[in-house]
Image (cartoon, rainbow, N blue to C red):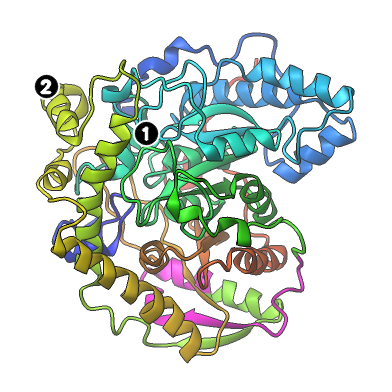
Amino acid sequence: MKYTNCLTLAFALTALAIGGTAHGLQANELPNTVGYQSEYPVYEGEAVTLDTSELSLAEISQGLTNGRFTSEDIVRSYLYRIQTLDKAGPELHSIIAIMPDALALARQADADRAAGRITGPLHGIPIIIKDNIEATGPVPTTAGSYALIDNVTNRDAPLVANLKAAGAIIIAKANLSQWANIRSSNSVSGWTSVGGLVKNPYALDRNSCGSSSGSGASIAASLGAGAVGTETDGSIICPSTINGIVGFKPTLGMVSRTHVVPISHSQDTAGPMTRTVQDAAMMLTAMAGSDAADSATKDADKYAVDFANSLSPDYLKGVRIGVLRDRVGNQTGTQKVFEAALEDLKKAGAILVEIEDSRSGFDGLGEAEFEVLMTELKADMNAYLASTPASNPYRTLADLITFNQQNAATELRYFGQELFELGQSKEGLDNSKYLAALEKAKRLAGPEGIDRLLKDNDVQFLVGPSGGPAWRSDLVLGDSFSGPSQSQLPAVSGYPHLTVPMGYVEGLPVGISFISSKWSDHAVLKAGYAYEQISRKRFAPQFHRTLPFNVGPIEFTKE
């Protein structure tokens, strides 16, 4: 099955998928455009000695508290890693732009700390945000397209404002799949005309998955303490599992979507992407909360707690977990790693319940989801573009289609825009076909989907492989995702979904998914944390050129 557009089953069911295995180009043959990011120097100054690789957000917070290092030390170290790993060396292309005030903000954070003014739990900690999320400053929010190169809004998305209120420093904006992979059914995940093609840090000719590919690769490579990704269907989970990190898609409405370039208000959400579950919980605590401009968040404050509180390795003792046995897939390596993960769950004290038939009762879900996304794409994109500054001349989805046609050599070089065109053909949000599809999709995925599976099997969580190992990037044939996926039901229902590293298939990461009911975000994080503490499967990437690994890792200079 092809994995595209942050979407999985929906496109396969609408005959938009392609099969087979892409052979791809070698990493050093993959063309990349650097775009406007070259205007912002990544690092100027002496070489950095502080090694921030694999430091967790929690460890950075503790180190700042006890004076082991300063915020300026941390920011300089990450900027240096971006210079040597993202723009040079392996050339990951996971970062589109550096926020030019990052070092100044780090120095201010240090001065505030010295004066006893601690803003919040993320004080002075550098965070990366995906480049479909707005932040104040001179850096545009592009969604990876030159159509939005002048989209300098000088406004913080509420989730960014919340991170800053907790003390975070926005250090950079991450590359992504252009327009969050909604433009075409034959796209190349991780490619944008602005930022080029994101490479997987574990094997540079492998894909980092869409659409939060840059967020995933950058955190795997320790280019920031944590990142924010966005998901419509799979775009936090897939790049997290494929890049060997933790990714959390919260309940729809837990985090504001205001000032985020949209696809679908029925499914879009932002979420944390980190190297540990504790870090994801810390970021979610800062990001969460109601927003008057986003009606979906009206209940968020009831459930927005300190998500890092009461995380315990003993949490799963006696907890019943449903194993989605018919959603494991047929990739032998992933199957073996998943079986080992189940043994770790048993060691953590969980009671496993085999669910052999979790697929019945979902006829028409894919088609209904697809109808909702195509209809909301037009309405939501038009509303977003209308809110952007006058400097942005493109005010509607139709304008974007025209821009792409006029700039086909840059924007449409590798794949088309048939999904943009399909979305443009849809009627408004009051048409009966859309309303019927929306009701059906939500009902099948939620009450008759996840809720039914939990109740009928008397379990608190559902688990399955988050995905298979990364495929080889191919700018000619597009993506060739062929592994399992658990993303559709939690994405369509709006329920929480967590992926945690569970092991490696020939050196390529794969993760395990934890899914539960609406607003059970804290419980899902607790479950993932308990599993993580006993499994501890993550190891740092070595930037190998390709598979097999005997070709050796990339050598890069630190002087």
Report the disc number at residue 370: none
Question: As shown in the figure, which amino acid type bears the numbered disc 1?
Answer: Ala
Residue 556 visible in the snapshot? no
Q: Does 322 lie within the magenta span?
A: yes
Q: Is residue 84 visible?
A: yes
Q: Nearer the viewer, residue 559 or 193?
A: 193
Separation of residues labelled 1 and 2 (CA atoms): 30 Å
Q: In the rendered image, which residue does mark 2 sit on? A: 406
Residue sitting at x 30%, y 60%: 8
Q: Which residues fall within the magenta stretch?
A: 312-338
Task: Write down the quadrant of residue 49 in the picture.
Answer: top right
| Residues packed near mark 1 inside 10 Å, few (<14), some (14 to 19) or many (20 plus) | many
Q: Residue at x 55, y 34 (%)?
A: 128
Residue 224 located left or right of residue 62: left
Can you tell which of label 1 and label 2 is closer to the viewer? 2
Name the residue: 53% across, 12% down: 41
Quick one: SS at disc 1? helix
Q: Quadrant of residue 429?
A: bottom left
Quarter residue 178 falls in: top left
Image spot of residue 462 (x, y percent): 51, 76
Between discs 1 and 2, the one toward the N terminus: 1
